[in-house]
Image: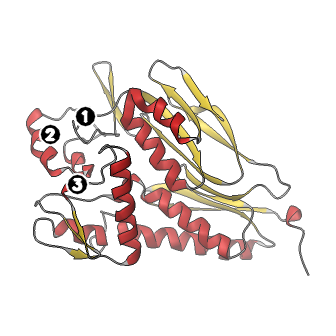
Amino acid sequence: MLTDASTLPIHRSSFKAMGSACEVVLTANTAPEAEALAKVAIDEVLRIERKYSRYTSSSIVAQINKQAGQGAVACDAETWSLFQFASQLFEKSEGLFDITSGVLRQAWDFRQPQLPSAQQLANLLPLIGWHHVILKDQTIALPLKGMEVDLGGFGKEYAADRAAQVLKEKGVTHGYVNLAGDMRFLGPKPHGEPWLIGIQDPRHPDQVIATLPMSQGGLATSGDYERYFELDGQRYCHVLHPQTGWPVKHWRTVSVTAPLAVLAGCTTTMAMLKEAQGLEFLESTGFDFFAIDQAGEVHVHS
C-alpha cells in the first residue's frame, strides 16, 4: 500500500562526526525505519571521516602526508577525483583555495590570543603550493618533506552530499543532512513547504540574523566567528590566506546556496579569501547568497 508522503512524520537523528554536532532529518513511516535510513547516511559520513581525516593515522591523507618528500602514493578512484577537484579549485581561485595550506595551523592556535612570529610563517609558507604537487597516473606526491594535504576545506560538504545521495538511493524525498551547518537538502517538508534555516548572527551567537527557505541543493556558511581570537582590538579568524599566512578580515559571514553542498562551501570559502573582491566573485557565480562585511553592511542575492 502506498503512503501519502504528506502524512509522514519527520524524524531527527543526531550524531557526532568530524568534531562537530550533526543531524539527519527525514520522513519515514516509523521510527525504526527512520533510524535505519539515518544509519545508512551516518555510516557514509563516518566512512569519509575515517578515510580522509588528517587526525586518523590510517587515513589516506595521513599516509600521503607521511610520505611527503619521499615518493608517490597510489589513490583510489574516489580520492583521485577529490584531488582533481582540488586542482580545479586552485586554478579557479588563482591559488587562493589551496589544500596544502593546512600546515599554517602549526603557527596559529585559535584557542589562545597569540600571534605567530614572522619566522614561524616564513618557515611554513614555502611548504604551501598545490602547483608543486605531482599528480600522475592516479598517484600523488608531495615533493617537500613537511608538506601536507588537508581536505578540511570541502570534506564536510562532500560528506553531506554523499550522505544525501545514499538517502536518495533509498527513496528519501523529504529531509536534509546537516554537518555542523554544511547542509544538503533532499526535498521540502512533507506538505511541500521549505525548511527554514536560520543563519547565526556573527556577532551575537545566540541570535539569528536571517532565515533562508531551503528545499533542494546545498547550503554552507563561512565566517570570522567560528574559530577566532581577539587581541588588541583586532579579530583573527581561522580562514588563513595561503600566500601570506595571515587571517582574512573583510567578511563577517558568507552563506551560499548551490546545487551541491560542496559547491556552496567552496564558494563561501573563496569569497572569504578574496576579501574585497569577494562580492564581485559571489555575484559572478549566479548562486544565491547572504553576506555581511566587516562594516556590518548586508549583501544579498536571491
The label on residue 194 is none
> How far is disc 3 from disc 2 in space, using C-alphas?
19 Å
Q: Is residue 41 toward the left or the right of residue 48 in the image? A: right
| Residue with the mark numbered 3 | 131
Please, what secondary structure does the residue beneath circle 3 have? helix
For marks 3 and 2, the one nearer the N-term is 2
For marks 1 and 2, the one nearer the N-term is 2
Q: Is residue 226 toward the left or the right of residue 124 in the image? A: right
The location of residue 168, given as percent across then percent down, is 67, 70
User: Picture quarter containing residue 3?
Assistant: bottom right
| Residue with the mark numbered 2 | 121
> How far is disc 1 from disc 3 in space, using C-alphas?
20 Å
Residue 204 visible at all: no
Residue 288 visible at all: yes
Q: Is residue 168 toward the left or the right of residue 281 in the image? A: right
Residue at 44% over, 22% down: 294
